[in-house]
Amino acid sequence: MVEMVREAMTNSKNVLVVEDETDLLDLISFNLEREGFVCRRAADGEAALAAVNHAVPDLIILDRMLPKRSGDDVIAALRHDVRTATVPVIMLTAKADEADELVGFAMGADDYVTKPFSMKALVARVNAMLRRTGTTTPSSHKAVYRTGPVKLDVDRHEVTVEGTPVSLTTTEFRLLKALIRADGRLKSRAQLIDEALGQDVAVVDRTIDVHVAALRKKLGRGAPWIRTIRGAGYTWREPTSADT
């Protein structure tokens, strides 16, 4: 049995590109390697999971429609394994409907790119994602937030609801942290995009809405604490009797 290990830290980040269209797989890899990334490739879902089992990458670009095992199956397996639960995943798909995007985020995607797409924009999203997930802030004490049924431990990157662990993607974790740290203050969609996705990522406001929907689904009894302020954004407040 091959032991799963984190690839050695180098100046270059390791990206696993999973795409069954050979030309597109080569093009994505070429553009990322030109920017200094180390790329590994997989053309189907089974090969993707085998590659991850051999060495966990820093980020995965994952096509949704794959032979042998679909991208949905692959991300579900990744998110149910503690060793890969927080690896950033950018999903590629030809499905552009909002419902399909919501399903992708609900399954654990950190970003969702529809085909056809700009190669320059994809590289920018990879860079932005890795900057967010690779930056750590030293602190002399653990930053732990307890609010209602939710406990968020920043240093351990852990969230529990009424003591039960909840597995969140990196983007969902950053979104929840931004809402909780606002301490009841309104956060606009633009502010949440900056804090959860990055200031240099160009996305529509709806992107935050689908992330919030996925986060609510995972939080269970903590979900009502995310309050929608129509036309303005979101806030984290104790729900009233009218909300339950």
Image (cartoon, rainbow, N blue to C red):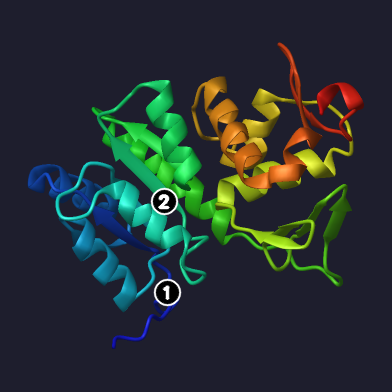
Label 2 sits on a secondary structure element that is strand
Nearer mark to the viewer, of 1 and 2 = 2
Total numbered labels placed on residues in the image: 2
Q: Quadrant of the N terminus?
A: bottom left
The Cα–Cα distance between marks 1 and 2, rounded to whole angstroms, is: 20 Å
Residue receiving disc 2? 89
**What residue appears at the point 49 percent right and 41 percent down from the top-left corner?**
106
Image coords of residue 229 (percent x, y): 77, 18
Up the image or down, 181 lies above or below 2; here it is above
Which quarter of the figure has residue 216? top right
- The crowding category of the residue bearing disc 2, from other C-alpha atoms within 10 Å (few below 14, some 14 to 19, many at least 20), is many
Q: Nearer the viewer, residue 103 or 221?
A: 221
Q: Which circle marks residue 10 in the picture?
A: 1
Amino acid type shown at disc 2: Val
Image coords of residue 189 (percent x, y): 66, 24
**What residue appears at the point 61 percent right and 45 percent down from the top-left corner?**
172
Name the residue furthest top. 231
**What residue appears at the point 83 percent right and 44 percent down from the top-left corner?**
181
Amino acid type shown at disc 1: Thr
Q: Is residue 35 visible?
A: no
Image coords of residue 109 (percent x, y): 45, 45
Up the image or down, 225 lies above or below 189; here it is below
- The crowding category of the residue bearing disc 1, from other C-alpha atoms within 10 Å (few below 14, some 14 to 19, many at least 20), is few
**What residue appears at the point 28 percent right and 42 percent down from the top-left corner?**
64
